[in-house]
Image: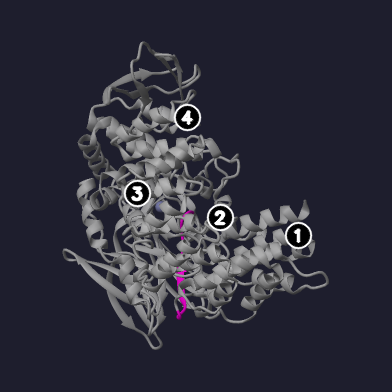
Amino acid sequence: MAFYRFLPVALLASTVGIAAAQAHKHKNYDLIDVSYRISMDARNEVVFGTCTNTLVLQEDATRVAFDFAKLGINSISVNGKPATSTTEGEMIWVQLPTSGKKGERLKITIDYGGRPEAGIYFVPAARAYPSKTPMVYTQGEAEDTRYWLPTYDYPDDKATSEAWLEVPRDWTAIGNGRLVDISFNQTNKVFHWKMDQPHATYLNSIVAGPYVEGKEMWGKMPVSYFVPPGLEEEGKASFANTNEMIDLFSKLTGFKYPYAKFAQSTVADYMFGGMENISAVTQTIGTLHPVDTEPLSSSKGLVLHELAHQWFGDTITCNDWSHIWLNEGFASFLPSFWVREHEGEDAFDLSRYDTFNGGLGAMVGEPRPVVNPNYEIPMDNFDGHAYAGGATRMFMLMELLGEKTFWNSIKNFLNQYKFKSPTTEQFFASVEKSSGKNLKQFMQQWFYTPEMPNLTVAREGGSFTITLGDKSPFMLDLPIWILQDGKWLKSNISIANRPVVLGDVKGLVLVDPEVRLATNLTYSFDYTNAEWESLYKAMPNAAGRARMIDLFRSKGKQDLLARLLSSEKSEKVVVRLINACSSLPAAQVSGLLNSPSPFIKEATLRQAAKLSGDKSIADQIRTMMSKEPNSQLKLQEFSALGRITNDTSMVIQAWMTDSWNDGYRAMALDVWFNTDKDQCREKCLEILEKPTTEPLRQNAIRKLGSLKDKPGERRVFDALVKVVQETSFGARNGAISALGEYGDKAALPYLEPLTTNSMFYIARSAKSAVERLKR
Ligand SMILES: [Zn+2]
C-alpha cells in the first residue's frame, strides 16, 4: 500500500515492538478457495455475508479456526451439515460435525452480518468530496479482512477467490479478477467476479458505488478506472497510460502481468494513498486533480507503486510481515524505471538519491533491521525501512550484480515463487542461484543489521583516510574519484572495519561520488568554495550534484549555492538549488520566474514570497497570474503576491473563491491562523456548522485543537466531540488529535472507548490523545 501524503508522519512511526510475529497456532489446513456473497445496507452501514472456505486438512482434526471479529454469525455448515462454533479473541473455532482426517477436503460455509467496526467502510455522499455520490470499500491489509470476511487472514497461505457482490441497480461493484457475469434479483444488481490464481486473503476487495468506468486495453486485457460521476476528466488525467506502465513492468521483470484485468477505483475518506488489491487497486480520491494542474499534480507515482505490487505483493507475497520489504521495497523501486524511461537518467539518479535518503533517514530515526520479526502490530513494519529502505537495497543489489543479471534473477525469482509467499532468505537463495554470486554478506549487512555504514573521510595534506569504524559489520566496494587537473581519476577500494589511507594525493577526493551506496557520508574537513565549485561542475551524475547541494546547504554555503544556480542545466537539480537557498536576490528570482518549467516556477514563487514589499516582483507575478493556464501555479502566484504586498483584501478575496479542494479558503485560514486567531476560530466553526467540502472541514478540525475556545465558551470543544462520534476516518482521526491538543480532560469519556477501536489509526490516535490529556 502507499501512504497518503497528508497523513502526519508521527502516526507512522513505530512503537518499540516486543511481541514476536503472530504465530499461526490455529492453522491445521491448507486454504484452497474463498467464495463469498456480500450485500449491504449502506445507509445503516450494515453488511450481510455468506462465505465458503474450501480447505484441505493437513492433520486429523475435530475443529478448524478462521479469523473473524466484531460481526454476528447466523449459521455455519461443514460440507452441508450444520455445525457450531466458539469465539476466541478475533478468531472462531468451527467444530466439525464428524472428525476430519488428514487430506480431507472441507467446504465450510458461514452466514454472518452486522455493523463492522473496520475492514469495510461506508462513505456518505456528504463526506465523499469531490464525489457527489456515496461509496463503500474494503481495506484488508494488514490483518483487517477478518472484520468483513471470515477466513484465514495471514499472508502465508494463498487461495483462489470468487465474489458475488449485491448492490443497488445504479451502482457498480468492483471485485478481484475477471467479471463472470452481472445478474439482477428483485431489487439489486449482482456482480460476479472470479480470481483464478491463488492469492493472499488480505488482497480480497470490494469497491462499490455509482461509478463510471474509463477503459483502455492492454492487448486483449481491459485496463479500467472507476471514478464517481462528474469526475471523468480527472480520472483520465490520473489513470490514462496505465497500460503503458503494465507493458514496462512486464518487460522489465520478464514476467507478464498475470491477471484477467487491471482496474483502479477511487474512494474517499481513505486511510491510505492506495492499496494493491489483486487486479483491482483501490486509490484515494485525493489523487484526482484537475487536468490543468499537471505536471505539478500527478498520480503517476501512486499508480506505478500499486501496479508494481501486482508483481511484488500480489504474485509473490511476503511470508509474514517481517519480510514486508519484499512487497513495499519492490513497489518503491520499480517506479524509478518508469522515471528513467520518461524523464531520463538525471531524474532516475535523483530518484535513487531520494530513495537512499529515505532508507538512511529511517535508520537514523528508528534503527532496526529491515527484516524485523519483533513488531507489536503488523503496521509497525510498514515504515521507511520497508519502503525506501527495501528499494535502496535493490538499487545496490542491481549495482552489485549488473542490471542484466539482476533482472534475470528477478524473473527467475518470480517464476519460482509465483502465487506463493517466500521469505527474504528464499529471495536471496533464488538470486544466488540465478546470478552465481555469493550474497550472504550482502544479505546479512543490509537486511539483518540495525544500522547503515557511517563513512568518514579525513584529510591531512595530500593524505586522505577513509573510515567505517572498527565495529562496523559492513564490507563495501567503494568508488573513489580524484579530480586532478580537471580530469577524474577513478578507482575502487574495499573497505571494512579498518581505515583505508590514500596517500600522496595530488587532487581532490570524492568518495562514492555518484551515490551508488547508501552510507552516512561525512567529510571531516572542508574544501574551499572554489574547490567545491570545481568538483560540482565536473560531476556528471545528478545524484552526486544533489548530494553536494545538501552538503553545501548544511554547511551554510549560500553564496556557492546561488552561484551554482546560474550555471546548472538540469531542471530537477535547479529546483533543488532553489530550494536549498535560504533566500535569492530579486534579480535572480525575476529571471527564474520566466522559466518555462512549472517546477522551477513553483520553487521560485516560494522564494519570491520572501521579497516583502518588492513592487517590481509583485508586478511581474500579477502579469503571470493574468495569463496563467495552470490553476495550481495560479494559486501559488496568488499566495506569493499576497505575502509580497501584505494586502489583507486578498485574504478576503481568497475566502470568497471556490476552487479544487478549497485551496484558496485553506490559504485564507492559514493567514488568519497566523495573524488573527479569533477570526480563524469563527471561520473554522462556521465550516463545521454548515455543509462544506471535506478537505476544508478537515483543515478546520486540525486547526481548532490549538485555537481552543474563547474563555467561557464550549463551542470548539462541542464541535470536536461531535466529529469524534462519527464513523468517518479522516475527520474523526483529526478531531481525536485536536481534542488531545485542546487539553480538556472532559474529552476522556469520548476518547477512551476509541483506544480499543479495530481501526489501527483511530486506536493509535486515541491512545496518544488520552496519554496527552492524562499527562
Ligand atoms: Zn505499497
Q: Nearer the viewer, residue 387 or 101?
A: 387
Three-letter amino acid code at disc 4?
Answer: Thr
Disc 3 or 4, which lies upstream in sequence? 4
Could you say whether the residue bearing mark 4 is in a helix, strand or loop? loop
Three-letter amino acid code at disc 2?
Answer: Pro
Marks 4 and 2 sit apart, C-alpha to C-alpha, by 28 Å
Q: Nearer the viewer, residue 757 or 201?
A: 757
Front tag of 2 and 3: 3
Q: Residue at x 41, y 31 (%)?
A: 446
Magenta residues?
132-142
How crowded pointer 3 is (Cα within 10 Å; few <14, some 14-19, many 20+) is rated as some
Tell me, for residue 8, which label it has, or none.
2
Q: Position of residue 654 (x, y in %)?
A: 54, 74
Tell me, for residue 449, which label it has, or none.
4
Q: Position of residue 699 (x, y in %)?
A: 58, 67
Disc 4 or 2, which lies upstream in sequence? 2
In the figure, 404 relative to 251: above or below?
Answer: above
Marks 2 and 1 sit apart, C-alpha to C-alpha, by 20 Å
Three-letter amino acid code at disc 3?
Answer: Lys
Judge from the rendering whether residue 392 lies leftward or rightward of residue 672; answer left or right.
Answer: left
Three-letter amino acid code at disc 1?
Answer: Gly
Q: Is mark 3 within 8 Å of ligand 1?
A: no
Q: Residue at x 44, y 47 (%)?
A: 60
Which residue in the structure is indicated by mark 3?
572
- Determine the main secondary structure of the stretch shown in magenta: loop
Marks 2 and 3 sit apart, C-alpha to C-alpha, by 26 Å
Q: Position of residue 107 (x, y in %)?
A: 39, 62
Q: Residue furthest front?
A: 616
Disc 2 or 3, which lies upstream in sequence? 2
